[in-house]
Structures are given as C-alpha cells and as structure tokens.
C-alpha cells in the first residue's frame, strides 16, 4: 500500500495538517481532549511531512548529480567533436597539398574519389592580424549599465569608451574587408584569394 508521502504532495500534506490542528484544538476546547483517532492521524501526517521533505531532498540531490554529469559529458563530447573537426581539417589540407604538389586534380580509391576543387568565390585571407585596421574588426565590449544609459542619453560621451570599456576580444569583419577590397580599397594585413577545398565523392 502506497504511503501518504507517495500519494500526496507537500502542499496537500500541509493543508491536511492545518485542518487536523484546527480539529484537535476545537475538540480540546469543547471536550477537554482530542480523540485518539484524530491524534493518531495527526502524527501520521507529521511523519508523512518529514518523509516527503526527505524524498524531495533526495530527488533534488539526484537531479543535481545528473545535471553535473550531463554537463561534464557535454563538455567532454564538445572537446572530442572539436578534436575530430581538427583532424578532418588537417587531413583535408594534407590531401590538398598532396594533389597540388603533384599537379593532380583527383585521386581514386575503390570507394572514394578525393578531388581538389576551386572555391566558387574569393575569400578573405588575413596575412597580418596586427596590421589589420580597427575599422575592420568587430569588437566585443562589456560596460556598466549606468554608463550605457548615460551614453544613450548623451552620445558625445561615447568618446570616453577607451577609458571605461572592458574589451572581451575582437572578431575580424570579413564581409567589410571583402567589400572594401572589391571597391579597390587597400586593407592592410588582408587580401582576397580564391582558395581550394577537398571534395569527397
């Protein structure tokens, strides 16, 4: 037979206890003492309340352990996926180097054909990151909320950013670099180049 703690929620047990306390107090006032059955039921629900609390505590601990395990597994699998992606990239580059150094278009096996194929469009190649103008970088910043509201209210204060911002790193704005070079602008530290990729069939 299922226990009260198994079939009732913590709120239901709490409501039942409140009702039993009122009944017991009412009987004590009117009859001098509470019925044994009522006291026994009250004790039963008190025990169920403690049992329910323990069941909830155990459940939370189990779920916390499961969450930690899943997060650690996710991190481990992410690392393995990153390592596998790196191996794929290195292997493809090795095959491309092999094909180009021997002036070959493709090599064939019994199951696969590895073919060097020119990209359909030019891509940006960064030759010198340090020389790349700041205008072609996407800068990730973190600033305090109070300062941000102040800047929105008084835009000339944006000049104070270099003194107050906290830089979190920067990304290369390849689209803006490509557009500038296509408009025959010179971008220091970058160039457009039609690359190659390995096609596997």
Image (cartoon, grey):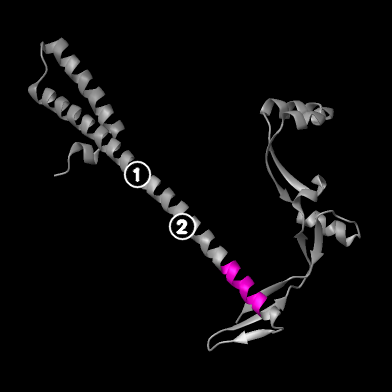
Does residue 93 show up magenta in the picture? Answer: yes
Q: What residue is shown at x 36% (from left), y 42% (from top)?
A: 64
Chief secondary structure of the magenta portion: helix
Residue 164 percent across, percent down from the top left = 72, 29
Q: SS of the residue at dot 2? A: helix
- Please say if 112 is above or below 181: below
- As measured in the structure, the alpha-carbon distance from the residue carrying label 2 to the one carrying label 1 is 18 Å
Q: What residue is shown at x 20% (from left), y 32% (from top)?
A: 48
Quadrant including the N terminus: top left
Q: What residue is shown at x 20% (from left), y 23% (from top)?
A: 20
- Please say if 23 is above or below 177: above
Q: SS of the residue at dot 1? A: helix
- Please say if 62 is above or below 77: above
Residue 11 percent across, percent down from the top left = 31, 31
Residue 89 percent across, percent down from the top left = 60, 67
For residue 193, which quarter of the picture?
Answer: bottom right
Q: Horizontally, is 64 left or right of 1 in the view?
A: right
For residue 155, which quarter of the picture?
Answer: top right
The circle on residue 65 is 1
- Please say if 34 is above or below 108: above
Neighbour class for label 1 at 10 Å: few (<14), some, many (≥20)?
Answer: few
Q: Over which residues does the magenta segment extend?
A: 88-98
Which residue position holds label 2?
77
The circle on residue 42 is none
């Amino acid at each position: 037979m299922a226990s009260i703690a198994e079939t009732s929620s913590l709120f239901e047990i709490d409501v039942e206890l409140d009702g039993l306390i009122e009944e017991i107090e009412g009987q004590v006032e009117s009859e001098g003492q509470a019925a044994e059955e009522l006291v026994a039921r009250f004790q039963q629900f008190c025990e169920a309340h403690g049992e329910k609390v323990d069941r909830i505590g155990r459940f939370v601990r189990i779920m916390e352990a499961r969450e930690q395990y899943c997060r650690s597994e996710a991190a481990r699998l992410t690392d393995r996926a990153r390592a596998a992606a790196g191996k794929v990239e290195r292997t493809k580059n090795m095959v491309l180097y092999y094909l180009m150094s021997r002036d070959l278009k493709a090599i064939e096996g019994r199951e696969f054909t590895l073919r060097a194929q020119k990209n359909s469009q030019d891509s940006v190649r960064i030759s010198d990151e340090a020389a790349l103008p700041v205008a072609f970088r996407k800068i990730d910043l973190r600033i305090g909320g109070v300062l941000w509201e102040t800047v929105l209210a008084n835009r000339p204060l944006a000049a104070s950013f270099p003194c107050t911002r906290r830089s979190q790193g920067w990304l290369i704005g390849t689209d803006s670099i490509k557009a500038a070079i296509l408009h025959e602008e010179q971008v220091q530290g970058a160039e457009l180049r039609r690359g190659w990729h390995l096609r596997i069939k």
